[in-house]
Image: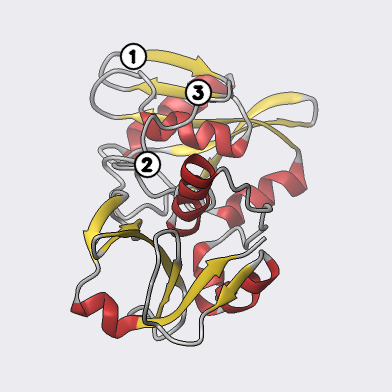
């Protein structure tokens, strides 16, 4: 049984949820390595378990990412393209409904807009919406900040308070007189300071919450009460 046959069998077992895993060279052979799908909406997208990925890396060499589309074509979605760019590996998609494969590789693709992006930790999240806006609107390139592979590790030990000053963001003395382009640091429902958004004027913020699409939102009382710091970029 080759790796495609192994994955097809696994994908049908996982349906109607999306199945996912890695293509790796193990003992000189291309091998399918199954990974748990940690996504909340397993029927619409997937999130590879980083522990399964690490185990695969300890066993062989990862050369690709594999997942299924239980319903519909194997055509890559914008989320697939974004994740492919982020991970830097070829993507193999198998359509169970049509018994068809698609393969694509990183090409430098980027989302056409900051609005409506699906949440991908480390690629499209609350911090990347900030840095992408600053690049597009202020021509400011924020130094790359390496964060934990797993979002739960970051939530348990958020680093925004320490990282923002190191990235040339100065905390303002008060939370008043907020300006366009300011980074707003919030205390989330976890009780930790693990979420940021960007103020874009007219009492609006550019925001990307977990399990939601990136969007513009009113800077309403809910966010005002959760605000714990205003940070302004300084050269």
Q: Report which residue position mark 2 lands on.
A: 114
Mark 1: secondary structure: loop
Left or right: residue 227 versus residue 60 is: left
Measured Cα–Cα span from mark 3 to mark 2: 26 Å
Q: Secondary structure at mark 3?
A: strand
Q: Residues within 10 Å of mark 2 (few under 14, many from 20)?
A: many
Viewer-side residue, 198 vs 33: 198
Instruction: State the image coordinates of residue 202 (x, y, percent, origin top left).
Output: 24, 60
Which sits earlier in the primary sequence, circle 3 or circle 1?
3
Please name whichever residue, 232 or 187, is drawn nearer the observer in this view of the structure.
232
Residue assigned mark 3 = 92
- The label number, if any, that marks residue 99 in the structure image: 1
Q: Which residue is found at the position 67% from the left and 45% from the top? A: 56
* 3 and 2 marks in contact (CB < 8 Å): no
Q: Nearer the viewer, mark 3 or mark 1?
A: 3
Left or right of 187 in this view: 162 = right
Question: Which quadrant of the figure contains the N terminus?
Answer: top right
**Where residue 176 sits: x, y (%)?**
36, 81
Above or below, 165 against 120 in this view is below
Which colour assignment does the render follow? Answer: secondary structure
* Residue under the point 30% across and 59% down: 201
* Quarter holding residue 153: bottom right
């Amino acid at each position: 049984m080759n790796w495609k046959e192994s994955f097809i069998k696994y994908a049908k077992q996982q349906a109607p949820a999306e199945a996912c895993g890695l293509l790796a060279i193990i003992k000189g052979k291309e091998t399918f390595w199954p990974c748990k799908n940690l996504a909340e909406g397993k029927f619409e997208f997937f999130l590879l378990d980083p522990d399964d990925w690490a185990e695969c890396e300890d066993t062989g060499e990862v050369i690709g990412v594999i997942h299924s589309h239980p319903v519909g074509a194997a055509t890559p979605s914008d989320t697939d393209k974004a994740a492919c760019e982020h991970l830097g590996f070829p993507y193999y998609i198998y359509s169970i409904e049509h018994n068809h494969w698609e393969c694509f590789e990183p090409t430098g693709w980027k989302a056409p807009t900051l609005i409506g992006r699906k949440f991908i930790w480390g690629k499209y999240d609350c911090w990347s919406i900030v840095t992408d806006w600053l690049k597009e609107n202020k021509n400011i390139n924020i130094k790359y900040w390496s964060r934990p592979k797993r979002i739960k590790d970051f939530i348990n030990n958020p680093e925004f308070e320490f990282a923002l000053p190191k990235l040339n963001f100065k905390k303002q003395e008060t939370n008043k007189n907020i300006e366009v382009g300011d980074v707003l640091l919030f205390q989330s429902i976890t009780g930790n300071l693990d979420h940021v958004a960007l103020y874009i004027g007219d009492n609006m913020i550019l925001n990307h919450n977990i399990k939601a699409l990136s969007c513009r939102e009113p800077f309403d009382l809910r966010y005002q009460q959760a605000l714990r710091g205003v940070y302004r970029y300084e050269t």
